[in-house]
Image: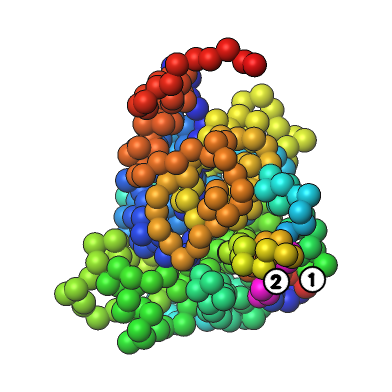
Amino acid sequence: MSPLPTLMVVPTGIGCVIGGYAGDALPSARLLAAASGCLITHPNVMNGASLYWKDPRIHYVEGYGIDRFAAGDWALRPVRQQRIGLLLDAGIEPELRQRHLQVADGCRATLGLEIGPVVVSDVPLGVHLGLGQSGASWGTLERPDALLRAGERLKAKGATAIAVVARFPDDQGSEALQAYRHGRGVDALAGAEAVISHLLVRHLEIPCAHAPALSALPLDPQLDPRAAGEELGYTFLACVLVGLSQAPELVRRSAANIRDLVADDLGVLVVPEGSLGGEAALACLERKVPVICVTNPSLLQVTSTVLGLGSEVLQASSYAEAAGMVLALREGVSLSALMRPLPALKEME
Amino acid sequence: MRLTSKTLSLSWPKDLKASDLRRWVKDQLSIHGAPLRWAITSVNHSAQDHGPVLEIEAVLIE
C-alpha cells in the first residue's frame, strides 16, 4: 500500500487543547504517520523540549517551509543527515549558554548527530513577546539583522540546518505562565519562536527550528502532564536537534526532482477545526487537497462553516477518527460506506 | 530591516471564494510590508449588509 502524504498542522500559540503545550500533539502525529505512511508536520507538533520521537515516516518542516510547500513554491527532499549549525543569542548568560553547548555535545555523543559550527550573534537579539487581539501569542525581535547575519555565517561555514536559541524574557510568577503550566491558556513564547524560525527559513531556505533559553522554573506539584516535557531539563534544545537531524532539504519547486515531495503529492490536510485561516490550510483549499478538520478547541473559530465551505471538508471528532479517515483514503475505501445511514443511489434528473 | 505586528480588518469581497483567500490576503498584507507570519483569526458575519469582515493578525517585514 503506497503512502498517502498527509500534512498535519497544529498552529502555534493559539492554545489548542491538543498540541498547545510541550509537543503534546506528538502521539497524534505518530498515529497519523502510521495511518498515512508519510506525514509532514512542524516543530510545534514534534518538539517536547527534552522529549522527542523519531519516525522515518515523519518529515519535520518548520512552519514557513510548510507554508511554502503547501503553496507549491518549495519541495521537500529527504536526506540522510543534516549538519546542524547552532546559533546562540548573545543575550544568553554564560552559564545558560554552557548548558546549551552541553546538550549539543550530548546529542553528538549519545545520538550521533552532526552538530557544528556554533555561532553567537554579534548583539543580543532582543525578543519581545506579545498577544494579538485574538489572544494568540505573537512576538518580534529588536535585531532581526543580527539573527540573519549569524545564520549567514553558519550557512557559509557548511551548516545545512540551523538550531537557534534565543534568550526569552523570564516570566516567572506571571498568571499566564501559571495557567500554561496548569494546562490552560496559550503558550506565550510560541508566537515569537515562530517569528524567529520563519525569518531564518525565509532568508536562508534551509531547515531551522528554535528553542527558547529560559531560567529553570521552581517545582510545581500541580503541573499539567501536557507541559511536563518542558520541565525535565535545563534547555528545550534536544528535540530541536533531533528533529533537524534528518529534516528534509528545502528545494525550490523549479529545481525539484521526481523523488522530492511536492504539494501535488499531498493526499490530505489534517487541521484543528478552528484553524482554517492559516496560510497552509488556505493553500490546501486553493489546491483542492482534501481537508480533515479535527475537534481540537483553541482560541480561534475560523471554521469551515464561517468560511462557507461544504462537503469538501471532512469533520473528525478526534485524531483517532482522523487517522481512520486517512487510512480509508489511503486504501481507497469510500468514507460514506463507513457511515450510516447509507442512502440508496438515485438516477440523475 | 524591522519587524512589525499588525492587525487588519478587511471586508471579504462577495465574489471571492474561500479557496481564493490566500492570495488575496497576501496581496492586502503586501501593501504594509512583506508578510512573514499571518493568519485569519476571525470571520465576523455580524455586518451582513457589508459582507463578512476578516480579522488578520500578521508579522510583517518593513
Residue at image point 76% right, 54% down: B14
Q: Is residue A258 left or right of residue A24?
A: right
> Please, is residue A105 above or below residue A295 in the view?
below
> Please, is residue A189 above or below residue A275 in the view?
below
Along the line of sight, the residue nearer the viewer: A292 or A97: A292
Residue bounds of the magenta highlight: B5-11
Q: Is residue B52 left or right of residue B62?
A: left
Magenta stretch: dominant SS?
strand
Circles 1 and 2, Cβ within 8 Å, touching? The answer is yes
In the rendered image, which residue does mark 2 sit on? Answer: B8
Q: Residue A266 sits in which quadrant? A: top right
Residue A224 lies in the magenta stretch:
no
In the rendered image, which residue does mark 1 sit on? Answer: B32
Amino acid carrying label 1: it is: His
Residue A168's x, y, as percent? 48, 78
Amino acid carrying label 2: it is: Leu
**SS category of the residue bearing label 1:** loop
Residue at image point 67% right, 48% down: B18
**Residue most toward the top?**
A347
